[in-house]
Amino acid sequence: MAKITTTRYDVAEYLRTPEEMAAYLEACIEESGGDAAFVAKALGNIARAKGMSQVARDAGLSRESLYKALSGERTPSFDTILKVIAALGLKLHAEPS
């Protein structure tokens, strides 16, 4: 039997356009079940795809604090989320459920 080699999947490598990033974030919000850390991790994946240093600059945050906030291990403040969403060139919107 042939040995199967696998590689680690990194979604950030596949998020190339703003449309793909928005669709990914939308799907993660829907699947989150209200878990803010899960959504923060999704934003972190998008930020890595776009370039964490540039996103940190555009959001007015340090790169290190941005990595920590979007690690998925903590829940960042809503202020941080709004800054990151704006820095990513995305919009947050609401619709009736």
Image (cartoon, rainbow, N blue to C red):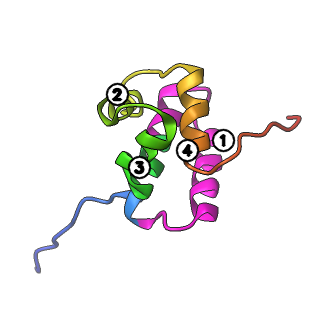
Label 3 or label 2, whichever comes before in sequence order: 3
Q: Assign a secondary structure to mark 1.
A: helix
N-term-proximal mark, 3 vs 1: 1
The answer for how far apart the CA atoms under marks 4 and 1 are is 22 Å
Q: Which numbered disc flags the more N-terminal residue, 2 or 4?
A: 2
**In the image, is residue 76 above or below residue 66?**
above
Residue beneath disc 2:
65
Task: Give the quarter of the figure containing the N terminus.
Answer: bottom left
Residue at point 37%, 47% (across, down): 52
Q: Which residues are magenta?
A: 14-41
- Amino acid at pointer 1: Glu
Res. 87 mark: 4
Answer whether residue 25 is magenta in the image.
yes
Query: Circle 3 sits on which residue?
Result: 54
Between residue 51 and residue 5, name the one nearer to us: 51
Disc 2 vs disc 4: Cβ atoms closer than 8 Å? no
Three-letter amino acid code of the residue under disc 3:
Gln
Q: Rounded to the nearest whole Å, what is the CA distance between mark 4 and mark 3?
A: 8 Å
Q: Quadrant of residue 78?
A: top right
SS of the residue at dot 2?
Answer: helix
Regarding mark 4 in the picture, which secondary structure is present there? helix
Q: From the image, give the main secondary structure of the stretch colored magenta.
A: helix
Q: Which residue is farthest right?
A: 96
Give, as a three-letter code, the residue at label 2: Ser
Give coordinates of residue 54: x percent, y percent. 41, 49
Q: Earlier in the sequence, mark 1 or mark 2?
A: 1
The kind of residue on which mark 4 rests is: Ala
Q: Nearer the viewer, residue 74 or 2?
A: 74
Are the residues flagged by discs 3 and 2 in contact, CB closer than 8 Å?
Answer: no
Q: Distance of mark 1 from mark 2, alpha carbons?
A: 26 Å
Residue farthest along the bottom direction in this orientation: 2
